[in-house]
Image (cartoon, helix red, strand yellow):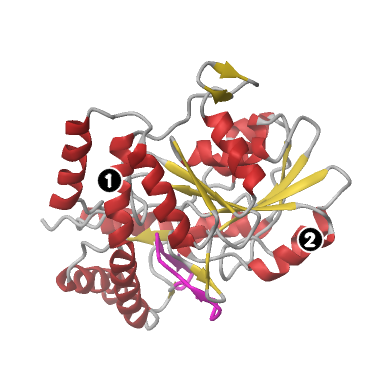
Amino acid sequence: MRRIPIAKPLLGEEEYQAVKRVMESGILAHGPEVEAFEREFAEYIDVEYAVAVANGTAALDLALKAIGIREGDEVITTPFTFIATANSILFQGAKPVFVDIDPRTYNLDPDNVLEKITSRTKAIIAVHLYGQPADMKPLMEIAEDHNLYLIEDSAQAHGAEYNGRRVGGIGHIGTFSFYPTKNMTTGEGGMVTTNDKRIAERVKLLRNHGQAEKYLHVELGWNLRMTSIAAAIGRIQLRKLEKFNEARRRNAEYLTNNIKGIKGLKPPYVDPRVKHVYHQYVIWVGEEYPLNRDELKEYLSSRGIRTAIHYPRPVFQQPLYVKLGYRQDICPNSIEASRHVLSIPVHPALTKDDLEYIVKTLKEPLEE
């Protein structure tokens, strides 16, 4: 049977040689390779500073620490995201305040943000979900009007653009993940991007035991550095990122053109102001389709097509957040999306035959 994975990192001879070079150098931990990756990534995003860290969760955590989020503060974000976005707020002793999504883009709805701002609100975390940028213009205006930090969770959106600007360089801080399923990978790794020197220097301090210079520790810090091996892979992957993203966009275009005629299935909506990079290609399984979302997932799996649900429940419905006392009926658009969305393969390793097979298989339940 044909096997089509939901994600597939593309690593080749260039990455192998880069790792080999680092291993031969003997500098395996943080060193010149990491610093080169930081410079190259900052240039790509078009920001002054990029600070490499151990993973995407560390990037979010350190970004919030760097701006001084603490116990009693509130940070507004979306509940329709991977749990790390909200957990990074809890790490500070602060309170995540969930705002509902735009049902078309699945991203934070700026109109709903205004309703949740209080005297304790200190920041907004906007997630560029599935590779589509959030509506940054009104979010930046809200942040400026209320003296708030705007953090871009860009873990799924390497190279995505909003009005011609790359995400991670629009708000006050950007954060990225380089997990193997992302549009580019370092194995594990993350990055914090900003134009604010103070924020960049503080992230550097906190990622390295609060060490201002060798064995001089000026505050409590952590070991959240990126390795040179990870950075070496990242430097090669960054050079390939545009090619990877164009392949994702071509695959998405094919899927959209062929899925939009299938009764009961809705392809992704794309905001005309953005460049979507399709970390995930997410269809909406509606009532008119013969199978519900979970049944379709099983049907595709039985035919060798791996899929995923991003995400099967909003964050406030996770057991941890239920224990914290969050109401379970908030953010109805997020709840509805969690019942209908299904991610199907879109990664650059797909062949034309793979794409044709996916579309053919999606049509079969209607024909039966």
N-terminal of the two: label 1 or label 2?
A: 2
Q: Position of residue 46 (x, y in %)?
A: 51, 63
Q: Over which residues does the magenta segment extend?
A: 268-288
Residue at 34% in and 78% down: 253
**In the image, is residue 271 part of the stretch drawn in magenta?**
yes
Q: Is residue 345 left or right of residue 341?
A: left
Q: Amino acid at mark 1?
A: Ile
Marks 2 and 1: in contact by CB < 8 Å?
no
Left or right: residue 198 versus residue 164 is: right
Q: Residue furthest front?
A: 213
Q: Quadrant of the C terminus?
A: bottom left
Quickly name the residue at label 2. 144
Q: Which numbered dot is residue 233?
A: 1
Q: Tell me how far mark 1 sits from mark 2, CA to CA.
A: 37 Å
Callout 2: few (<14), some (14-19), or many (20+) C-alpha neighbours within 10 Å? Answer: few
Magenta: main secondary structure equals loop
- Residue 137 position within the rendered picture, expressed as x and y whole percent measured from the top left: 68, 70
